[in-house]
Image: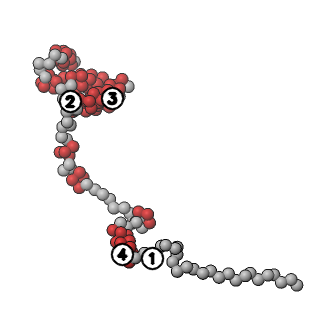
Amino acid sequence: MVQSPQPAHVEFVLPETPLPGLRRPSVRFWVLTLLMATAFPLSAQTGSRRPALIRDTDTAEGKDEAAAEKEKPFNPLAAEQSMKVGDFYFKKKNYDAAIQRYMEALEYQPNLFVAYDALGRAYEKQGKPEKALRVYKDFLQKYPQSDKAGDFRERAARLQKN
């Protein structure tokens, strides 16, 4: 019978420090680590708790609505951009979106004639002549001496006949 060779006994010798040149962490390191762990829990990673809901109480209770209803600052560039987007929607016959963009343009530049004109046309195309008439009368009330007041008077008269 043949004997199998016995594995040689290997002995490992560990150095006193894990890697040469490194020191053991100080007590201050462990205290700071513990403080950070309690201040910023990792519950999102562990999945042990559901995340807390963040709620802006003022907005939820309607107190912030007054700030949202403030007039937008005078900005002709933003008004022009809104007009271009509104014209795009108008050509695509998406009158609701066009109306929103024309109204936004008027918020940025309240004296913009083309926005009133386009808004009235969009309401007419949408089949809401009473709203178009209100837009035309609003323009005439605000700017009665405008060069375009005659056009708006004609449109208002035409809509009142119908």
Q: How far apart are marks 1 and 2 (CA)?
A: 68 Å
Q: How far apart are marks 4 and 3 (CA)?
A: 61 Å
Instruction: From the top left corner, tell me how far across and down residue 112 is, in percent.
Output: 21, 25
In the figure, residue 121 lies in which quadrant?
top left
In the figure, residue 82 lies in which quadrant?
top left
Q: Identify the residue position indicated by label 2 in the image.
A: 109
142 to 53, vertically: above or below: above
Instruction: From the top left corner, tell me how far across and down residue 40 is, in percent.
Output: 35, 66
The structure residue drawn at horizontal position 30% and vertical position 29%, both measured from the top left corner, is 81
Q: How far apart are marks 2 and 4 (CA)?
A: 61 Å
Q: Identify the residue position indicated by label 1 in the image.
A: 24
The structure residue drawn at horizontal position 28% and vertical position 56%, both measured from the top left corner, is 55
Sequence-first tag of 4 and 3: 4
Q: Identify the residue position indicated by label 3 in the image.
A: 85
Sequence-first tag of 3 and 2: 3
Q: What element carries label 1?
A: loop
Q: Do the residues labelled 1 and 2 touch (CB within 8 Å)?
A: no
Colour treatment of the image: secondary structure
Q: Which of marks 1 and 3 is in front?
A: 1
Q: Distance between the residues labelled 1 and 4?
A: 11 Å
| Viewport quadrant of the C terminus | top left
Q: Which of marks 1 and 2 is in front?
A: 1
The structure residue drawn at horizontal position 26% and vertical position 23%, both measured from the top left corner, is 118
Nearest to the observer: residue 115 or residue 36:
36
Q: How far apart are marks 1 and 3 (CA)?
A: 65 Å
Q: What residue type is labelled 4?
A: Arg
What mark, if any, has residue 153 been given in the picture?
none
Q: Identify the residue position indicated by label 4 in the image.
A: 28
